[in-house]
Image (spheres, helix red, strand yellow):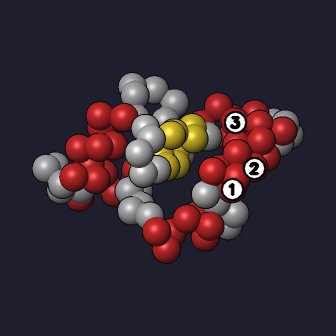
Amino acid sequence: MTTQILPSVQERAVVLNWSERKTWQKWSLEVRVFHMLSGENDFNPMVMLFRPFRGAKSFLFFSAFKEWKHGETKKVEQLRSELMQAL
C-alpha cells in the first residue's frame, strides 16, 4: 500500500491513517465522508475515488491483503490495476 498505491494518489488525496484515528477531527469533512462511505467491516486499507458527475468508487483492499499474506497476490494486483485505470 505505501510503496505502490499511496505514491500514485497522494498528491491529490487526503490520507486518513487508521492508526491515528484518535487524533482525527470529528467534524471534518474528510472524517465525516469516511464514516459515511466506508462501511462497518473490511475497509482498511481503502481508496475512495471521487469523480465529477459520478458517484464515489471505493477500492477495498482488506480481504485482498489477507490473501496476499498467504501468497495469493491476484486480488491485490486486480484492485491496483482497476484503481490505476480509474485514475
Kind of residue indicated by mark 3: Ala
Q: Is residue 27 left or right of residue 56?
A: left
Residue 38 appears in the figure? yes
Residue 74, compared with residue 51, is above or below; it is above
Q: Residue furthest left?
A: 27
Q: Residue furthest bottom?
A: 11
x, y percent for residue 64: 70, 36
Residue 68 appears in the figure? no
- How packed mark 3 is, by other alpha carbons closer than 10 Å (few <14, some 14-19, many 20 or more), is some
Query: Which of the labelled discs sits on residue 84, or is there none?
Result: 1
x, y percent for residue 30: 28, 53
Q: Quadrant of the C terminus?
A: bottom right
Instruction: Looking at the picture, tell me which residue is in the foreground, 20 or 13.
Output: 13
- Number of the front mark, 2 or 3: 2
SS at mark 3?
helix
x, y percent for residue 81: 75, 49
Q: Mark 2 highlights which residue?
A: 81
Residue 8, compared with residue 36, is above or below; it is below
Residue 3, compared with residue 20, is above or below; it is below
Mark found first going from the N terminus, 1 or 3: 3
- Number of the front mark, 1 or 3: 1
Query: Which of the labelled discs sits on residue 46, or is there none?
Result: none
Instruction: Looking at the picture, tell me which residue is in the foreground, 2 or 30.
Output: 30
Mark found first going from the N terminus, 2 or 3: 3
The quarter holding residue 17 reads bottom left
Kind of residue indicated by mark 1: Met
SS at mark 2?
helix
Residue at mark 2 to residue at mark 3: CA–CA distance: 13 Å
In the image, what residue occupies the spot 38% across and 56% down? 16
Kind of residue indicated by mark 2: Ser
- How packed mark 2 is, by other alpha carbons closer than 10 Å (few <14, some 14-19, many 20 or more), is few
Q: Mark 1 touching mark 2, by CB under 8 A?
A: yes
